[in-house]
Amino acid sequence: MNFRFFLLLMFLVQTSEFSFADHEVSFRTPAKRYGSAYSIKLVLMRNGFTYDVPVWVKPDQRESSLDFDQLAELGWNDPRLKPELMSMSDESLEIPKFKNGKSDWANLPVFSRSCCYGVIGQDVLRDFEVRFDPTPPAHLEWTRVVPEEDSQAERKKFRPELSGLFSVHSIYGTVQGKKIDFSHTPYRLSLMKSELVMEPEWRDPNSDEHPLSSPIFQYQLVMPKRNLVPTQISVRYFKSARKVGFKPGLKVVRLNSTLVSTLDRFELEDFLKGRKSKTLTIATEKMSYVFDFEKNEFTGSQSLQTPPRRY
């Protein structure tokens, strides 16, 4: 009886392994979004050393590239040598022949130079169907696909549709003649099928949006702490801002309890346009100020009894 059970168990194991091999393998990796462009972290290994290398995902670029000068700064002894292992979210990838290329292909947003050491292009992406999801936290879902006979004609025809997708300057783009808000719209891309599928817009069910067309004030990001410093307050809000003591030159460290240093420019503007909540608390190290997007004015300020920790 035990022997029969053992044979049955072995049969099931073998069957399940065979079935698993026939299925596509999926995984998810965290991403950082700049406008409608995404960056991810690749893990490269060589001579026993591991390198965490952030790279852009750029489907309209045929070849993947790395900035050899930046790799050398990380300690890579000879950037021309291929890594022994390349992985993403613990998933091993086929290693492309990286060409040498600078990563600032699109005039990156302020302080994002450290973001990326290269670009992942079609030579890697062709083996996957990739779903780009801006839902916080932003991420990419990768599904490995079975290779098919390459069709250069289809791919060449498909490339123009991809070139407008990835902008670091704006969250908007045009796809098939339709304006898309990429900060809320997931989409699926399959290079093998020459297929781009836009999904329904995602909205945070817990947010109460009152979006403005422009931020409530202009700003700059000041290093080394990457504080947000207002430079000019809209005339529309200047009177209520002066009443509560909010003015240009203040060093803002938090927006609704979120550290400014953790946000990119487009995430910052989501806060400053009312896309996160109906009220916004703007905190310096000593004071907090409240802006009400329903009333379109600053409504109060408060001294912080215990200043927040310095970063």
Image: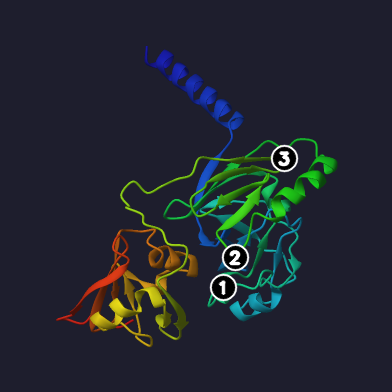
In percent of width and height, residue 54 lies at 57, 66
In the picture as drawn, the residue positioned furthest to the left comes out as: 305
Question: What is the secondary structure assignment of the residue under circle 1?
Answer: loop
Please say whether residue 226 is visible from this viewpoint: no
Amino acid identity at mark 2? Val
Closest to the camera, between mark 3 and mark 1, is 1
Drawn side of residue 73 relative to residue 96, left or right? left
In percent of width and height, residue 284 lies at 29, 81
Amino acid identity at mark 1? Pro
For the residue pair 263 and 170, the one nearer the viewer reads as 170
Q: CA distance from mark 2 to mark 1?
A: 7 Å
Residue linked to disc 3: 192
Residue linked to disc 2: 168
Number of marks: 3
Question: What is the secondary structure assignment of the residue under circle 3?
Answer: loop
Quarter of the rendering containing residue 43: bottom right
In the picture as drawn, the residue positioned furthest to the bottom comes out as: 249
Q: Residue at x 75, y 58 (%)?
A: 63
Closest to the camera, between mark 3 and mark 2, is 2
Residue linked to disc 1: 109
Identify the mark nearer the N-term, 2 or 1: 1
Please say whether residue 68 is visible from this viewpoint: yes
Q: CA distance from mark 3 to mark 1?
A: 31 Å
Q: CA distance from mark 3 to mark 2?
A: 26 Å
70 vs 210: above or below: below
